Image (cartoon, rainbow, N blue to C red):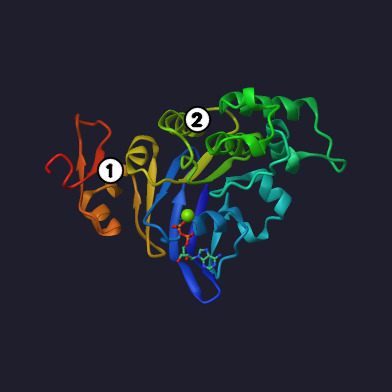
Amino acid sequence: MLRVENLTVAYGSRVALREVSFDLPDGRLMAIIGPNGAGKSTLIRALSGVLAPRSGRILVDGQDLASIPSMERARRIAVVPQARQLPPAFTAWEVVLMGRTPHLNWFGQTSARDEELARQAMERTNTLHLAERRVGELSGGEQQRLLLARALTQSAPLLLLDEPTTHLDLQHQLALLGQVRGLVHENGTARRTALTVLHDLNLVARYADLVALLVDGRLAACGTPAEVLTPERLSEAYQVPLRVLTPAPGGTPIIVPSSFGQD
Ligand code: ADP
Ligand code: MG
């Protein structure tokens, strides 16, 4: 389980997250939503351990993240970052295999099992056909899927994703979130938990178990999609009048601007 306690994070004098607290139980997919600049990427960076809190703590299975050595952290937390940052001269296969780095021995040799895990992750993310291609010549969407494949290869129980659907077409957006949700809801021994920044509120309504709404560095709401995705909350957070339509009882709600279909 992931526990965030009174987390405050700053860049110099600019406070980007203030007193954020929430729990994320194992085996759940949490979406982080909120307007630009709300602190979503900052939260992902803090949870990945690359940005130290100014105050408060992050507990991973009860252990303070700040006290976990970086290699051990990489075995427990995998990150799909927002910006494209893959080394262009490497092949897709090499990049995905890099996900095994925290598990390798002193000599950095990969085993047949490492390769099998990389192959499985590429199969899952529909990237196996790209294995021999150089990363620099792949499209944004293909690179995005490779980033997910690399993160899956890392076999970490906690998966952090920052806007993973940005470069993807609709088919691949649905596929990626379906894959992440499938991993999280799998009942295997290696139980996974995921936290993902998403902009598309309709995808949030469809895929997330829990939603954290950040506004101006504060946690404005945290709960189930039904609790958080209310027209009042969203309209206030995004400063746009929004409506939440529920086409069928118990069905996935659809979030649209208030004027939609009326003008
Ligand atoms: P989001 O991902 O929700 O759009 P960010 O977490 O990237 O927001 O940013 C939150 C706030 O922190 C913004 O005001 C942003 O300008 C600021 N910020 C982000 N990264 C840095 C940085 N490296 N240095 C200084 N300020 C930053
Ligand atoms: Mg961001």
- The residue tagged 1 is 226
Residue at the extreme bottom of the image, as rendered: 13
The residue positioned 42% from the left and 45% from the top of the image is 198
Please provide percent x and percent y for residue 182.
48, 29
The residue positioned 25% from the left and 55% from the top of the image is 233
Residue at the extreme front of the image, as rendered: 137
Please provide percent x and percent y for residue 127.
60, 27
Position of 89 with respect to 23 (left or right) is: right
The reply to whether the C-beta atoms of the residues labelled 2 and 1 are less than 8 Å apart is no
- Residue 13 versus residue 73 in the image, above or below: below
- The residue tagged 2 is 179
What amino acid is at disc 1? Ala
Give the number of callouts. 2
Position of 101 with respect to 33 (left or right) is: right
Query: At numbered mark 2, what does the secondary structure look like: helix, strand or loop?
Result: helix
- Residue 120 versus residue 217 in the image, above or below: above
Query: At numbered mark 1, what does the secondary structure look like: helix, strand or loop?
Result: helix
What amino acid is at disc 2? Gln
Q: Quadrant of residue 216?
A: bottom left
Nearest to the observer: residue 159 or residue 127: 127
Q: Quadrant of residue 260?
A: top left
